Amino acid sequence: MFFLVRLQLYNDCIWLKSSKYCPYTDYGLTQGGDKMKTALITGITGQDGSYLAEYLLAKGYFVHGIKRKASLFNTQRIDHIYQSPYDTDKRFKLHYGDLTDSLSLVRLIQEIQPDEIYNLAAQSHVAVSFEMPEYSSDVNALGPLRILEAIRFLGLQEKTRFLQASTSELFGKVQEVPQNEKTPFYPRSPYAVAKQYAYWITINYREAYGMFACNSILFNHESPRRGETFVTRKISMALCQIALGLEKCLYLGNMNALRDWGHAKDYVIMQWRMLQLDEPEDLVIASGEQHSVREFVSLAAAELGIQLDFKGQGVDEYAVVADISGNLAPQIKPGDVIVRVDPKYFRPTEVETLLGDASLARQKLDWKAEHSLNNLVSEMMRSDYDIAQKKLLLQSH
Ligand code: NAP
Ligand code: G4F
């Protein structure tokens, strides 16, 4: 198994070296003689960080990433692009650091002298921010301040461009529909309040010190790499496991919540494009389509040939299997109840509805999302079905 993983890593390095997008050369220069750009990604081990790292490597960047010290490996999402420290040609390097540790940030930014910093690191789970408000604020509000101040303190404000991963959670209790760059904020969680500080400190550093610093105001975006406790991934994983008899029932919170879901791969490209603009701008990135959590469950179930009927209201709501076609769900039958509500997943204050208007981003960045919601759901379900099949195989041996 270990051997196979190493072989896979080796193959990926070969791919990187021979990619037509990124002629592979020494640190600092591309083959054409242009300066090779250097990017620093915080949150590189997360969903977006992993896609952004792939994208920047394919564009010929030298990519540095900050990872946290953990007692187990936390690099699963980027293992396929890992390059050995003994590789003399490497263009990808991980460093230990933490957004709560100013000294590590100053030292790394001084050492790397990045052209671009993408601040994607965060305690990114809204529900968890109610459990850990102080830590969430330290990372999500003061983290970006520490990076901005390091850029200024090191005199890099002319060289280093900064992108802050901001969020549609700022709109919270929405003041208008759809939400755009001018919609007033009304944050509804410690997570969102901290992100609002980060939003304004980014603008303050831009205005006070002339830095190229901007906010990507991202609506929800998902992928097979989404963290397992966010609602879309929780749904895709649970339904696949239920279909194969590994679980019995999926427990959810507020199924009426409405979200504007896009694909993470599309959204990291937008963030790169934002740092290539002539002038820094804060832009909304969204799909412009809205669906409920309940609809997401139905779409995901349909990928397995399962048709669900939702019955009951509030905490008594449940979903029963109305019909099954195909052979992807051998362990369930019509009449089975496979989704129920557990009020422990309700939040003290909820964001009921989000719908973004990304027309400014489309115009400024010449952007069109490549993935539809249906593509996204299919991709997530295929990936989680594979994972569930492997788990089943392991259990039966
Ligand atoms: P994610 O998968 O949860 O990744 C978060 C990353 O931040 C992980 O690499 C995590 O490291 C790292 N991190 C957490 N605390 C840290 C700390 N104290 N110091 C250094 N690194 C730390 O999040 P994501 O979905 O990729 O989102 C990326 C960014 O976009 C986040 O800032 C999020 O708030 C924002 N955002 C996301 C969405 C969305 O729908 N995905 C929408 C709007 C905004 P570990 O791997 O060690 O945990
Ligand atoms: O998937 P979620 O946890 O994402 P949420 O809270 O919208 O936050 C995500 O998107 C934000 C952008 O708008 C980011 F800033 C943030 O970092 C994160 O990536 O929940 C989506 C909705 C919520 O209304 C929640 O109450 O789904 C509802 N929900 C219903 N049952 C559930 C569940 N959410 C989770 N996580 N787990 C449930 O069982």
Image (tube, rainbow, N blue to C red):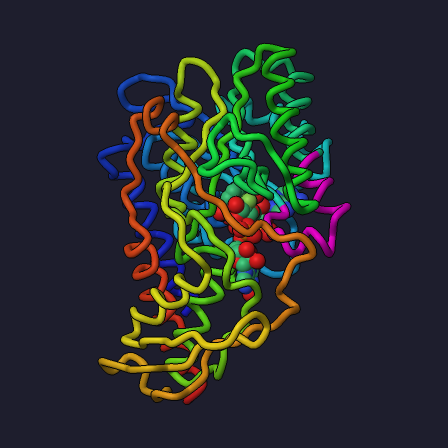
Q: Quadrant of residue 119?
A: top right
From the viewer's side, name the closer residue of 143 and 37: 143
Place of residue 149 in the rendered image (x, y in percent of width and height, measured from the top left)? 68, 22
Instruction: Describe residue 62's horizontal placement relative to residue 315 as left or right.
Output: left
Residue displayed at 46% across by 60% down? 293
Residue displayed at 45% across by 46% down? 50
Magenta region: 123-141
Residue 6 part of the magenta segment: no
From the viewer's side, name the closer residue of 288 and 326: 288
Q: Quadrant of residue 59?
A: top left
Residue displayed at 44% across by 43% down? 355
Q: Give the quadrant of the N terminus.
A: bottom left
Residue displayed at 25% across by 38% down? 19
Place of residue 257 in the rendered image (x, y in percent of width and height, measured from the top left)? 51, 56
Place of residue 210 in the rendered image (x, y in percent of width and height, measured from the top left)? 58, 10
Q: How many marks?
A: 0
Of helix, strand and loop, which mostly describes the magenta segment?
Answer: helix
Q: Is 31 drawn above or below residue 220 in the view shown?
A: above
Visible in this render: residue 84?
A: no
